[in-house]
Image: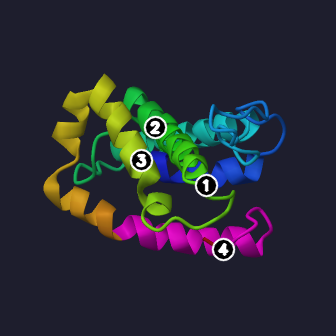
Amino acid sequence: MIPAYVPNSAAAVFGGGTPIDFGKAFGDGRRIFGDGKTYRGFFGGVLCGILAGLVEIWAWSSFNLTALPHQTFLSVTLLAAGALLGDLAKSFLKRRLGKERGESWFLADQYDLVIGSFLLILLVDPQWLFENITLPIAVWIVILTPLLHRVVNIIGYYIGVKEVPW
């Protein structure tokens, strides 16, 4: 999951600039995504996720880490892009529900990246998903994701790349 975990933090670091929705509103009068979702953040986050995945591929083959899922360039790209697509989908839903940018949305804030990355892999490379994400790995993902999310967001808040610590 490293290629899916990295993009959200990297997007916060590289973000800014032109919003993905160009400041436009949806039919309900609310912003489509909001100012927090930018092209620079999206592409910077995906690139960092892919780079983290390439390091993982190198480590897997160099150190024979066969107990870990075997990543491919396609899988790391799908995990990284899917994580931020899941975040975009969550932001779209938050705006429809009237939630403001930075407002906490329990569970959705923690699992959007997992759902987005798994859905994208399921659509494009389901064989990789079913061969590599076993039940024990899925359980660990469910347990570790909210813990990692919280720790990383607190760090991001204290170093000034996030406006809120959640």
Q: Residue 59 carries which label?
A: 3
Q: Name the residue at 71% across, 34% down.
A: 25
The amino acid beneath tag 2 is Gly
- Rendering coords of residue 55 (x, y %): 50, 44
Q: Is residue 162 magenta?
A: yes
Q: Which of marks 1 and 2 is nearer the N terminus?
A: 2
Q: Do the residues labelled 1 and 2 touch (CB within 8 Å)?
A: no
Q: Nearer the viewer, mark 1 or mark 4?
A: 1
Q: In this view, does 161 lie to the left or right of 54?
A: right
- Disc assigned to residue 82: 2
Mark drawn on residue 132? none
Q: Which of marks 3 and 2 is in front?
A: 2
Label 3 to label 2: alpha-carbon separation: 23 Å
Residue 8 can be seen in this image: yes
- Secondary structure, mark 1, is loop
Question: Disc 3 and disc 1: Cα gap in Å?
Answer: 44 Å
Residue 2 at what x, y percent from top left? 45, 52
Secondary structure beneath dot 3 equals helix
Image depth: mark 1 or mark 2 in front: 1
Residue 129 in which image quadrant: top left
For residue 75, above or below residue 107: above
Q: Which mark is residue 165?
A: 4
**From the viewer's perspective, is the residue at label 3 or at label 1 nearer?**
1
Q: How far apart are marks 4 and 2 (CA)?
A: 23 Å
**Quick one: 60 or 1, which is closer to the camera?**
1
Q: Judge the density around disc 4: few (<14), some (14-19), many (≥20) Cα neighbours within 10 Å.
A: some
Residue assigned mark 1: 98
Q: Give the range drawn in magenta.
A: 144-165
> 103 or 81: nearer the eye?
103
Label 2 SS: helix
Q: Which residue lies furthest to the top in this view?
A: 124
In primary-sequence order, the first of circles 1 and 4 is 1
